[in-house]
Amino acid sequence: PIYLDWNATAPLKQAAREAMRAALDDVGNASSPHGPGRRARRRVEDARAILARQLNIDPTRIVFTSGATEANTTALTGAHVLASAIEHPSVAVWAKSKIPVDARGLIDLDALDRMLGDDPLLSIVAVMAVNNETGVIQPIGEVADIVHRHGRRLHVDAVQAAGRLDLAPIAAVANTMSLSAHKLGGPQGIGALLLTDDLCATPLLRGGSQERRRRAGTENVAAIAGFGAAAAELQHDRATDVASLRDALEAGLKARADDLVIYGEGAPRVGNTSCFGAPDLPAETVLMALDLEQIAVSSGSACSSGAVEPSPVLLAMGVDPTAARTAIRVSMGPTSTRADIDRLLSAWGSLYDRRRRRAA
Ligand code: PLP
């Protein structure tokens, strides 16, 4: 089987598997004041220290959550949120108004400036670092300058930036930031909210004093340990060249289909993601045909595949709904190979040719 859906979830790294196994084979509540408890506490704090080093922030600013959805929810609940028009649903759901993006998927900085000037009630601006469907990178430094000049707070969903961009410069300008372990080779169901300044988000879960009273409930020690072990390899992930695979994929697609459209092509993009479509080749058809050949890709975002709705991200970029329904997302990672891409190209190419012949 060929797995090219890393933006939906990445394969578990060996180091993460080992760290989790060791934690699972041990007993101990991280809050207990005895040997086993202290060992569990050590696993949690070691993971926190690894993340803190990657982000160049103080470890006390990291709150472990059940994932990025919970981190986003914690950061945004109850606030008047101005969000980009291409956010993940767990952010988009809180948006009172939306910052438009251009045809390449880049946010309109003038509109951001204007909207903040016009609406004094807006308290938090949410702009993702990297889009999960197109791989387009937002200019977070410039966004932060505008947001802070207006005296507002910036929340950055950095889930898809992990392993692809240096997270420290993002953490340096965001007021809050979210990460998810399963997108970087850790387990599903664990993430982090980074509070990079003293204005803490209101806890969603209260009661126990875990996570400095910012997230009550016994820590998921094994998942946190796996998260830390996976995060320790982020530099290595970033140093691995997947962009040349992406470029080979896109060149191969264009050679096979002169009407191919690549979404976000003109914008800065991370190297692992390609979102593309060809007219008359509906994403559902492609997905099913590739699945039969044991090639896993995605249509738009994982959340919208299965549904026939066109991706809101592509619609926000001005793509017409019919074209948006053809969009396929291929996402790779450090262990993806040229052979994976060649298999995909050959399967997609024959599908495209068959459609063409039928239409002729
Ligand atoms: N934000 C982005 C950009 C994502 O791609 C995802 C993935 O599903 C999430 C948030 C949600 O993360 P989680 O699955 O940890 O809740």
Image (cartoon, rainbow, N blue to C red):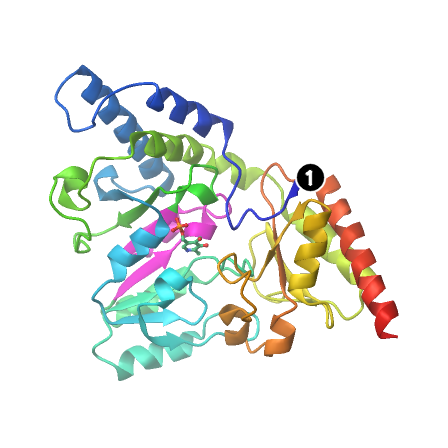
Q: Position of residue 90 (x, y in %)?
A: 36, 60
Relative to 41, residue 159 above or below = below
Q: Position of residue 188 (x, y in %)?
A: 41, 41
Q: Quadrant of the C terminus?
A: bottom right
Q: Residue at x 36, y 51 (%)?
A: 68
Residue 170 falls inside the magenta stretch: yes
Quadrant where the N terminus lies? top right
Relative to residue 261, is residue 119 depicted above or below? below
| Residue 104 lies in quadrant | bottom right
User: In the image, is 297 to the left or to the right of 184?
Assistant: right
The three-letter code of the residue at mark 1 reads: Thr
Q: Is residue 102 visible?
A: no
Residue that badge 1 annotates: 337
Residue 173 on image: x %, y %: 32, 56
Q: Is residue 203 left or right of residue 64?
A: left
- Above or below residue 60? Residue 172 is below
Q: Is residue 288 visible?
A: yes
Between 164 and 7, the one lying in front of the other is 7
User: Residue 257: where, in percent of width, then height?
Assistant: 80, 65
Q: Nearer the viewer, residue 345 or 217?
A: 217
Q: Is residue 242 left or right of residue 45?
A: right
Name the residue: 84% across, 63% down.
Answer: 354
Name the residue rendered at 30%, 62% in the picture.
Answer: 154
Secondary structure state at the residue bearing disc 1 = loop
Per the rendered image, the range of residues in magenta is 153-179
